[in-house]
């Protein structure tokens, strides 16, 4: 299914998007990737959504990526005798391991790992940062705090600890069970929550064992500090601005977003900008002007994908939310300023033959009348390198591996086409020309750039570039075997 834009759209499925007709309508409206949130829904519900997506993929003959988002460890306070208490600024408040229901002076925090890592001066944020506590004294089973920002604290509210690296694994027992379940089911991407260091990513990768690509969610200050190592260990990144905006000053999030997007692009790894992009469309058919501006900013930055969460999972206007993102993307990418920004932010990186081939393909395509770049790829690396260049013409990613086609649905500009295994370069050029014509990117009188590796079907062997006509008669009469 041809898109009229390069940035990809990720739509989260949930109660508002739970049946064949709605999910198909979301895909037709512009959703390239469907996110299954493992924090909500039983395994049976997740299995059914997966089945529906694969049926739509088959019915439309259009590769679709499925991203399973693991919950990660959830840190929460215990319960209160009165269900809730009002904490006053300046008051003392204790957190401990005592499971006795809490009151206005204390409550249980059933996470000994937090107490192990805390030190005087550290902050604890409760209920998405609405309540702010600072540690004055702590031990292995308690933390005496002062209330810096007061408010109502109630049963099982979430706790964020931004100032320290917690001795917690990114994968809880539930996450391990969920990971194995979705890998057996056949998802394409695993989103890993609560990442603090590269070690967390390697643990998930070992468990996935090649069955899914690993995408790290950046939502903690520790992850921002260790980002280069995390990026190196990951296949992709999600800038999860929700928790990031709780644990860091909100004013720090936009420059972090811009910096991480550029680093991902330089590394040729897809990046998603997520959280509250069209939040008002949960209840309104129209977004705010600020939300549209936020979506546009992420696109101008060169992100691979933008994501809808509750807007498509639980909102009243899931299809309209996707349509809105699609329209904003088309409008932004048609702006001459977009091309200027993308070109100015291009970073020349890499010294391999493949790096040179994709850079040359972009140069040729943009300086001559070339309609598309067709790259043959097994592992997906050539397509990712081509996407890093952000060329001004469409990228047609040709592969015989359905898993590769699906994973590339998350990558900027990649239009994925299945092709049979090929043995000769001439057959590759013919298949590329047919795909360009069939997808509406080129006509018989047009030309395309074809990149491939010889010998065929060997990952990482990209070593050839050909400017080819889309007229098959000319290919057969002029191209080498």
Image (cartoon, helix red, strand yellow):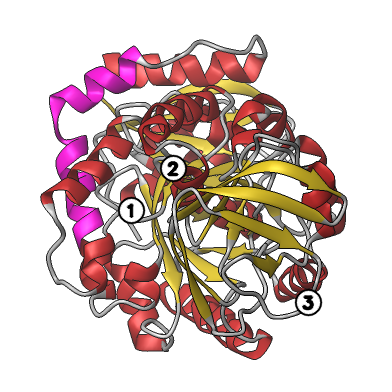
Q: Secondary structure at mark 2?
A: strand
Q: Nearer the viewer, mark 3 or mark 1?
A: 3
Q: Residue at x 34, y 37 (%)?
A: 394
- Indicate the position of residue 286 as horizontal and vertical percent values: 12, 65
Q: Is residue 303 above or below residue 240?
A: above
> Distance from label 2 to label 1 (Cα)?
9 Å
Let me know if residue 329 appears in the view: yes
Q: Earlier in the sequence, mark 3 or mark 2?
A: 3
Residue hosting label 1:
439
The residue range painted magenta reads 324-344
Residue hosting label 2:
396
Quarter where residue 134 is shown:
top right
- Indicate the position of residue 105 as horizontal and vertical percent values: 62, 65
Quarter where residue 118 is shown:
top right
Q: Quadrant of the N terminus?
A: bottom left
Residue 99 circle label: 3
* Image marks 2 and 1: residues in contact by CB distance under 8 Å: yes
Q: Is residue 77 above or below residue 116?
A: below
Say which of 406 and 360 sits in front.
406
Q: Is residue 353 above or below residue 466?
A: above
Q: Residues within 10 Å of mark 1 (few under 14, many from 20)?
A: some
Q: Earlier in the sequence, mark 2 or mark 1?
A: 2
Q: Residues within 10 Å of mark 3 (few under 14, many from 20)?
A: few
Q: Residue at x 67, y 13 (%)?
A: 352
The reply, left or right, for residue 381 in relation to residue 167 is: left
Say which of 247 and 80 sits in front.
80
Let me know if residue 167 appears in the view: no
């Amino acid at each position: 299914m041809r898109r009229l834009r390069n940035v990809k759209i990720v739509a989260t499925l949930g109660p508002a998007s739970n049946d064949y007709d709605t999910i198909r309508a979301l895909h037709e409206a512009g959703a390239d990737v469907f996110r299954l949130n493992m924090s909500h829904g039983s395994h049976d519900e997740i299995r059914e959504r997966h089945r529906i997506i694969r049926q739509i993929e088959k019915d439309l003959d259009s590769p679709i990526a499925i991203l399973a988002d693991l919950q990660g460890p959830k840190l929460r306070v215990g319960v209160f005798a009165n269900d809730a208490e009002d904490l006053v600024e300046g008051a003392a408040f204790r957190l401990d391991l005592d499971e006795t229901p809490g009151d206005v002076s204390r409550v249980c925090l059933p996470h000994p790992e937090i107490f192990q890592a805390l030190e005087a001066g550290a902050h604890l944020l409760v209920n998405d940062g609405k309540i702010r506590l600072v540690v004055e004294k702590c031990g292995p089973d308690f933390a005496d705090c002062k209330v810096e920002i007061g408010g109502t604290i109630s049963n099982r509210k979430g706790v964020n600890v931004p100032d320290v690296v917690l001795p917690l694994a990114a994968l809880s027992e539930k996450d391990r069970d969920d990971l194995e379940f979705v890998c057996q089911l056949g998802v394409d991407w695993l989103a890993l929550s609560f990442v603090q260091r590269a070690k967390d990513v390697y643990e998930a990768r070992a468990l996935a064992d090649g069955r899914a690509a690993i995408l790290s969610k950046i939502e903690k200050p520790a992850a921002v500090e260790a980002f280069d190592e995390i990026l190196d260990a990951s296949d992709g990144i999600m800038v999860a601005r929700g928790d990031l905006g709780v644990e860091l000053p909100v004013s720090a999030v936009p420059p972090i977003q811009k910096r991480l997007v550029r680093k991902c692009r330089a590394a040729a790894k897809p990046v998603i900008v997520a959280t509250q992009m069209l939040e008002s469309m949960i209840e309104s058919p129209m977004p705010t002007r600020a939300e549209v501006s936020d979506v546009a900013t992420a696109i101008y930055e060169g992100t691979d994908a933008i994501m809808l969460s509750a807007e498509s999972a639980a909102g009243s206007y899931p299809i309209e939310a996707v349509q809105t993102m699609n329209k904003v993307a088309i409008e932004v990418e048609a702006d001459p300023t977009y091309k200027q920004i993308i070109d100015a932010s291009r970073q020349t990186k890499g010294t391999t033959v493949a790096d040179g081939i994709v850079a040359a393909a972009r140069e040729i395509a943009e300086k001559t009348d070339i309609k598309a770049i067709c790259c043959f790829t097994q592992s997906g690396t050539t397509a990712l390198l081509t996407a890093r260049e952000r060329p001004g013409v469409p990228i047609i990613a040709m592969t015989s591996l359905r898993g590769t086609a699906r994973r590339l649905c998350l990558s900027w500009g990649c239009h994925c086409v299945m092709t049979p295994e090929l043995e000769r370069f001439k057959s590759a050029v013919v298949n590329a020309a047919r795909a360009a014509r069939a997808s509406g990117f080129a006509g018989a009188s047009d030309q395309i750039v074809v990149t491939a590796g010889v010998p065929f079907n060997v990952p990482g062997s990209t070593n050839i570039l050909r400017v080819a006509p889309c007229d098959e008669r000319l290919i057969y009469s002029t191209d080498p075997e």
